[in-house]
Image (spheres, rainbow, N blue to C red):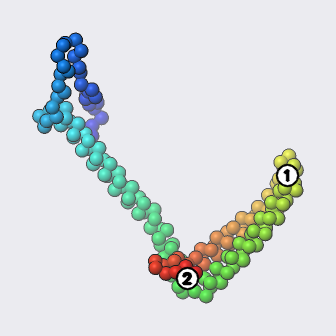
């Protein structure tokens, strides 16, 4: 593709309103019309460029998903090698989720009880974040790891438990 400006093709045909005759017929689309040949060439170039863009996008998705597929394969291999531990992780994740729910209830009660102090005072807000933030963050991380280790994909055709 060149960067040279190409002449624009008219979008509408000219109609002579001064004469008593009907409108002039539009140019017949034929392979002899240089404007149509140029337009067809431009459309072909656009289609080729779009196809190339699609190919590049597919390649990029493939490259980006390869590490994720490898991680899933390694995790599945670990689960097959340690089925008892994977089951223990499942139970632990369920228990930690219940503990997290209780913790969230405590956290929300603290927010409701100290709303004005938290809103108006930086010191109280910092104390609140220091008290609840790290524990919440660590609990989330632990639950995430346990859940990943416990996750068992449902094979096609099998019944869920």
Q: Which of 155 and 71 is in front in this view?
A: 155
- Reading the image, the residue beneath label 2 is 79
Give the residue displayed 27% in from the left and 48% down from the top: 48
Does the rendering let one see residue 34?
Answer: no
The residue positioned 22% from the left and 11% from the top of the image is 18
> Between residues 136 and 29, which one lies in front from this camera angle?
29
The answer to whether any part of residue 90 appears in the image is: yes
Quadrant that contains the N terminus: top left
Disc 2 crowd rating (10 Å Cα; few below 14, some 14-19, many 20+) is some
Of the residues tagged 2 and 1, which is closer to the observer?
A: 1
In this rendering, is residue 72 above or below 19?
Answer: below
Give the x, y percent position of residue 54: 35, 54
Residues at badges 2 and 1 in contact (C-beta under 8 Å)? no
Give the left or right position of residue 63, taking residue 89 as reference.
left
Image coordinates of residue 39 in percent, x first then y, are 23, 36
Q: Where residue 149 appears, x then y in whole percent?
A: 60, 77
Q: Which of marks 2 and 1 is nearer the N terminus?
A: 2
| Observer-nearest of 58 and 25 | 25
User: Can you identify the residue that label 1 sits on?
Assistant: 115
Residue placed furthest toward the left: 32
Instruction: Please rate how many residues cluster around mark 1, counting C-alpha atoms within 10 Å: few if below 14, some from 14 to 19, many from 20.
Output: few
The CA span between labels 2 and 1 is 45 Å
At x 74% / y 69%, what residue is drawn? 100
* Residue found at the far top of this picture: 18
User: Mark on residue 71?
Assistant: none
Q: In this view, does 137 lie to the left or right of 22?
A: right
Question: Going by the image, does 85 lie left or right of 96?
Answer: left
User: Residue 136, position in %: x, y?
Assistant: 74, 65
Secondary structure found at label 1: helix
User: Circle 2 — which element?
Assistant: helix
Residue 2: which quarter of the image?
top left
């Amino acid at each position: 593709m060149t960067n040279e400006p190409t002449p624009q093709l008219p979008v509408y045909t000219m109609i002579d309103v001064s004469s008593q005759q009907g409108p002039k017929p539009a140019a017949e689309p034929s392979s002899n019309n240089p404007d149509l040949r140029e337009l067809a060439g431009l459309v072909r170039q656009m289609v080729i460029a779009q196809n190339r863009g699609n190919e590049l996008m597919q390649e990029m998705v493939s490259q980006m998903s390869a590490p994720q597929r490898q991680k899933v394969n390694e995790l599945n291999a670990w689960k097959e090698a340690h089925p008892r531990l994977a089951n223990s992780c499942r139970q632990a994740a369920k228990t930690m989720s219940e503990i997290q729910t209780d913790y969230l209830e405590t956290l929300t009660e603290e927010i409701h009880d100290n709303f004005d102090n938290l809103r108006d005072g930086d010191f109280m807000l910092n104390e609140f974040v220091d008290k609840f933030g790290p524990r919440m963050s660590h609990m989330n991380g632990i639950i995430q790891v346990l859940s990943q280790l416990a996750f068992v994909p449902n094979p096609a055709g099998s019944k869920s438990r």
